[in-house]
Image: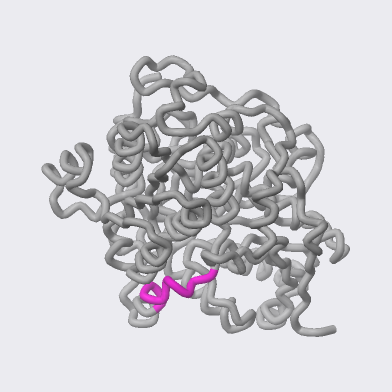
Amino acid sequence: MPDTIKYVLSEDQMPKFWYNIAADLPSPPPAPLHPGTGQPISPSDLGAIFPAPIIEQEMSMEREIEIPTEIRNIYRQWRPSPLYRARRLEKALDTPAKIYYKYEGVSPAGSHKTNSAFPQAFYNKISGIKRLVTETGAGQWGSSLSMAAEAFGLECLVYMVKVSFSQKPYRRALMETFGAKVIASPSETTACGREILATSPDSSGSLGMAISEAVEVAAHDPEASYCLGSVLNHVLLHQTIIGLEAKMQLELAGAAPDILIGCTGGGSNFAGLVFPFLKEKLRGGGGPRVIAVEPKACPSLTKGLYAYDYGDVSKLTPLVKMNTLGSGFVPPGFHAGGLRYHGMAPLVSQVLQHGAIEATSVDQLEVFQSAVQFAHAECIVPAPESSHAVAIAIHEANLCKQSGETKNIVFNLSGHGHFDMQAYMDYFAGKLVNYAYPEQEIAMALSSLPSV
């Protein structure tokens, strides 16, 4: 048997519909609340920052939503993405487990984020929008949206978390190559940015801060819309093409998954892989173990509260019920592994509450050690975010070695790390350290949650 086994679908086998897990939840998703009134939001409340087709998808309870032909034609550049059997990694680990990974690094931006960037740009274009405004952390979302905006003739403004703006200049350059304007956040260009800098002039930034700036700009510009790369229902919907393809590819491999694994920051790539596998489990049936992996430096699923909270620092966004560390959460500047958002997607949080998934966290050094081990075996340098999933896949494979069990382990390799080499250089130089977010700081952040 060859070392590398790749399971490939034809273009004709690409899914024609996205899967909406909201239709199969045991209880309806808790309604988002208006930040001013505290009452459930209506579609018109969201009209200031989103176009009508996006709002419709965000609130939809339909199980299947058709992928527009225009988007399927664009997807063909990199979809269906391959599923690999990691035989060389299995051999290196000397495990009886069978390890598979769905590889989203084949996209133009090098990550799964393009799966939602192009639909969002398309829906804004047909709605008459001229400009897209967003935030980005490590830069994968900003890169994807800048490409999508250029493809549909739209302007793109990106607020990039300041620490990443400095640490990842090549991501910034990639966005600018596609015509985007990139601003380090917090900035002097918005009222909320100026307010943050007035009290914390040396702030390294956070996704919550960058979201505040992007939402402020979009809300005051009738020709602009806000775009988000994770967390919201419509983003997770677009990402389910990953899991829908993976189901077909695993059937080709003759392998029913025993364990599904994905890294979690806001929840988009994790949901994209696992949601299509959860339908029967949510109805009380069987199914694979599903593991969400997050950094110990940003433990929203393992240590956060399931509560209503704002998605941004300035409290401009609707309140959503999710696992959260508090909207004021700021990760340490030396955290290099990504996945820095203070909250988790409401739908991911809800399936955790229903017991359909489990969550764990890993230290930064284990993440990079696992990434290097994977690179040596599979000849792909994974993004630091994706490497959280790699770490737990290796952990589970080692447990199989101890027990002698043969399990099918499947994880989402959500992107490559070609623009993250500074983090790898810091790891090799011994500059990275483990950091578990202190319990007292978590308690302090959670004490300021809104009363709902």
Is residue 420 highlighted in magenta?
Answer: yes
**277 relative to 146 in the view: left or right:** right
Residue 44 seen from this side: yes
User: Which of the 4 image quarters holds residue 253?
Assistant: bottom right
Residue 443 seen from this side: no
- Residue depicted at 45% across the width and 44% down the height: 300
User: Which of the 4 image quarters holds residue 391?
Assistant: bottom right
Q: How many marks?
A: 0
Is residue 153 highlighted in magenta?
Answer: no
**192 relative to 207 in the view: left or right:** left
Residue 197 lies, in percent from the top left, at 15, 46
User: Which of the 4 image quarters holds residue 434?
Assistant: bottom left
**310 relative to 194 in the view: left or right:** right
- Residue depicted at 62% across the width and 52% down the height: 291
Residue 348 lies, in percent from the top left, at 58, 40
Residue 178 lies, in percent from the top left, at 42, 63
Query: Is residue 407 depicted above or below 38 in this figure?
Result: below
Residue 217 lies, in percent from the top left, at 30, 39
Q: Quadrant of the N terminus?
A: bottom right
Query: Is residue 303 depicted above or below 321 in this figure?
Result: below
- Front-most of residues 382 and 256: 382
- Front-most of residues 350 and 14: 14
User: Magenta span covers which residues?
Assistant: 416-424
- Front-most of residues 96 and 155: 155
Query: Is residue 289 depicted above or below 226 in this figure?
Result: below
- Residue depicted at 52% across the width and 46% down the height: 121
Query: Is residue 111 depicted above or below 31 in this figure?
Result: below
